[in-house]
Amino acid sequence: MSGMRLGFLAVAVAAALAAALAARFLMIEPRGAELMCSMQGAAAWCPLRAALAPVFDYQGFGIASLAAGLFAAWKRRPAWGVAALLFGAVGLVLFNVELAAAGAVLGLIAVTRQTPAQAA
């Protein structure tokens, strides 16, 4: 993988981490968020919070990261490796640590692996 592509990948993973951190600390973890979202005339971000909660409760980001990482390693598809890294970054922040870490490592291996044509 070229240095420029690797740079873009690093920026994409950093953006995914930043978005996940913002969602975690601004919408999910505040003590009054659940109460505020249950009131009439709730904030505009409350439907997003309601949609995100079941996804990380049932390990959605971790499963997506692991599945993409396994597929990327099996088929040698770097694009799936990128998906595994992005889902893994989000999963690491949003409480899906075990599966997201495994998927992110598989994605990183798939992204950085050289094909025999590249090695020659």
Image: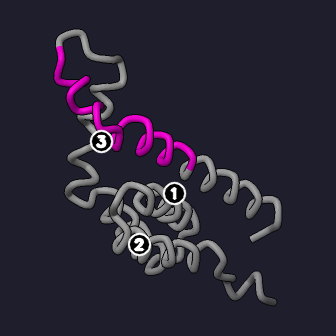
| Amino acid type shown at disc 3 | Leu
| Amino acid type shown at disc 2 | Phe
Does dot 2 land on a helix, a strand or a loop? helix
| Crowd class of label 1 (few under 14; some 14 to 19; many from 20; radius 10 Å) | many
Query: Residue 27 appears in which quarter of the rendering?
Result: top left
Give the residue pinned by disc 1.
86
**Magenta stretch in the rendered image:** 18-39
Residue under the image location 35 percent in, 38 percent down:
30
Whether residue 106 sits left or right of residue 35 in the image: it is right
Work out which quarter of the rendered image holds the N terminus and state it.
bottom right
Whether residue 67 sits left or right of residue 105 in the image: it is left
| Cα separation between marks 3 and 2 | 24 Å
Is residue 61 or residue 36 the one in the foreground?
36
> Where in the figure is residue 60, as x and y percent of width and height?
28, 57
Is 32 covered by the magenta stretch? yes
| Cα separation between marks 2 and 1 | 15 Å
Question: Most extreme residue toward the top, as rendered?
Answer: 41
Marks 2 and 1, the one that precedes in the sequence: 2
Is residue 98 or residue 73 the one in the foreground?
98
Residue under the image location 35 percent in, 68 percent down:
67
Give the residue pinned by disc 3.
52
Give the residue pinned by disc 2.
71
| Crowd class of label 3 (few under 14; some 14 to 19; many from 20; radius 10 Å) | some
Seen in the picture, residue 112 relative to 33 is either above or below; the reply is below
